[in-house]
Image (spheres, rainbow, N blue to C red):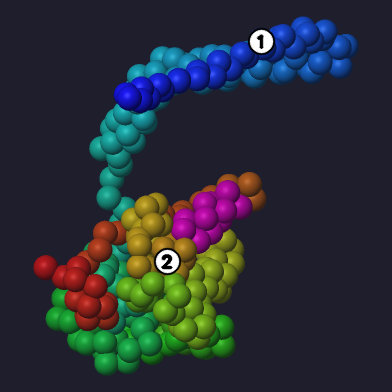
């Protein structure tokens, strides 16, 4: 007897009932308001951007159109100044009393020597007594020269007053005042001590103001005189690593411009003013500072 095995396969068929789509959403008044507001804001923003770009482009166009005129005006001014200077005769300063602060070394010494060659009587002022007398000794070798040394701290009002009296007694009233005293520490601002900051400002800027205040009234009374301030290019372009120094030079520029305007408005511009912007130089007082900063060649 033979047994037969029968295999029955049962297949389960899953029937999926389709899900009907959600009913369409009917826009409400609130949704319409938000959409309208967003569209308006976007359109306004685009319009503002276009207006801003238009104004910027207009400025660029105007600047480019005016640039040749500006350059021509600057060139013309310098040309006229040069031509005018050609017609000027060198001023005779023979017998004039010239006071030079910071005259014990560097630029101050060179200014004093040159003025002595021109015939001026020199008051060499410096806090460094040795430097003062060295400058006077050099000037003494110039024929018919007259020079005296005055050890003075120009940042001290009391010492300035005593010096002024002594100079007028020994040499006469000051005709030419040259403010040149200066300190130049190559130190970043955070590393400066408070007393160093005060000292730099009082010498580099305060002394210029106080010496001018001391000698200007008598220049005005005599209707003659010249005040020259030695500034620096760092008064036009700041010098990194010498922020306080640069600030004092900016201050000198502002003070001298104000002084010039004061003299003109008070009809006292027969007293002349000059600002000399010097470049960096190797002076004995600042040489080690420049060397430390890697600026000595």
Circle on res. 157: none
State the mark number for residue 18: 1
Residue 100 visible at all = no
Q: Earlier in the sequence, mark 1 or mark 2?
A: 1
Task: Name the spot of residue 226 as percent of width and height, x first.
Answer: 44, 60
Q: Residue at x 59, y 63 (%)?
A: 221
Tell me how far mark 1 sits from mark 2, CA to CA. Answer: 81 Å
Q: On the rendered image, what quadrant is the C terminus found in?
A: bottom left
Kindly identify the residue that appears in the image at 67 percent across and 12 percent down. 17
Q: 10 Å neighbourhood of mark 1: few (<14), some, or many (≥20)?
A: few
Give the extent of the magenta segment: 250-263
Up/down of 289 relative to 127, above or below: above
Main SS category, magenta section = helix
Residue at left offset 45%, top offset 20%: 9
Q: Nearer the viewer, residue 289 or 101?
A: 289
**The furthest residue to the left:** 297
* Residue 36 screen position, x and y as percent: 77, 12
User: From where the camera sits, is residue 238 visible?
Assistant: yes
295 vs 207, left or right, is left
Q: Which residue is mark 2?
A: 243
- Taking the magenta stretch, the answer to whether it contains residue 253 is yes
Q: Secondary structure at mark 1?
A: loop
Q: Which mark is nearer the camera, 1 or 2?
A: 1
């Amino acid at each position: 007897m033979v047994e037969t095995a029968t295999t029955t396969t049962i297949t389960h068929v899953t029937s999926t009932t389709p899900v009907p789509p959600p009913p369409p959403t009917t826009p409400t008044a609130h949704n319409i308001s938000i959409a309208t507001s967003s569209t308006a804001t976007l359109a306004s923003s685009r319009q503002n951007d276009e207006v801003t770009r238009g104004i910027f482009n207009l400025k660029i166009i105007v600047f480019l159109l005016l640039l040749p005129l500006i350059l021509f005006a600057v060139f013309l001014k310098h040309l006229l100044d040069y031509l005018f200077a050609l017609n000027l005769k060198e001023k005779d300063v023979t017998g004039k009393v010239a006071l030079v602060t910071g005259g014990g070394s560097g630029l101050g010494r060179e200014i004093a020597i040159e003025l002595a060659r021109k015939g001026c009587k020199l008051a060499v002022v410096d806090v460094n007594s040795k430097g003062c007398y060295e400058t006077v000794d050099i000037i003494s070798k110039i024929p018919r020269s007259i020079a005296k040394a005055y050890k003075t701290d120009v940042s001290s009002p009391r010492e300035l007053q005593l010096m002024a009296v002594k100079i007028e007694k020994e040499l006469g009233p000051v005709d030419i005042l040259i403010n040149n005293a200066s300190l130049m520490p190559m130190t970043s601002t955070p590393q400066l001590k408070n007393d160093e900051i005060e000292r730099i400002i009082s010498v580099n800027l305060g002394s210029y103001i106080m010496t001018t205040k001391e000698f200007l009234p008598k220049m005005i009374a005599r209707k003659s005189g010249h005040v020259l301030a030695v500034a620096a290019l760092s008064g036009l372009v700041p010098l990194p690593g010498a922020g306080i120094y640069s600030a004092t030079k900016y201050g000198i520029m502002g003070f001298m411009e104000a002084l010039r305007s004061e003299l003109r408005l008070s009809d006292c511009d027969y007293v002349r003013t000059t600002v000399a912007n010097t470049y960096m130089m190797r002076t004995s007082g600042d040489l080690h500072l420049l060397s430390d900063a890697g600026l000595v060649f």
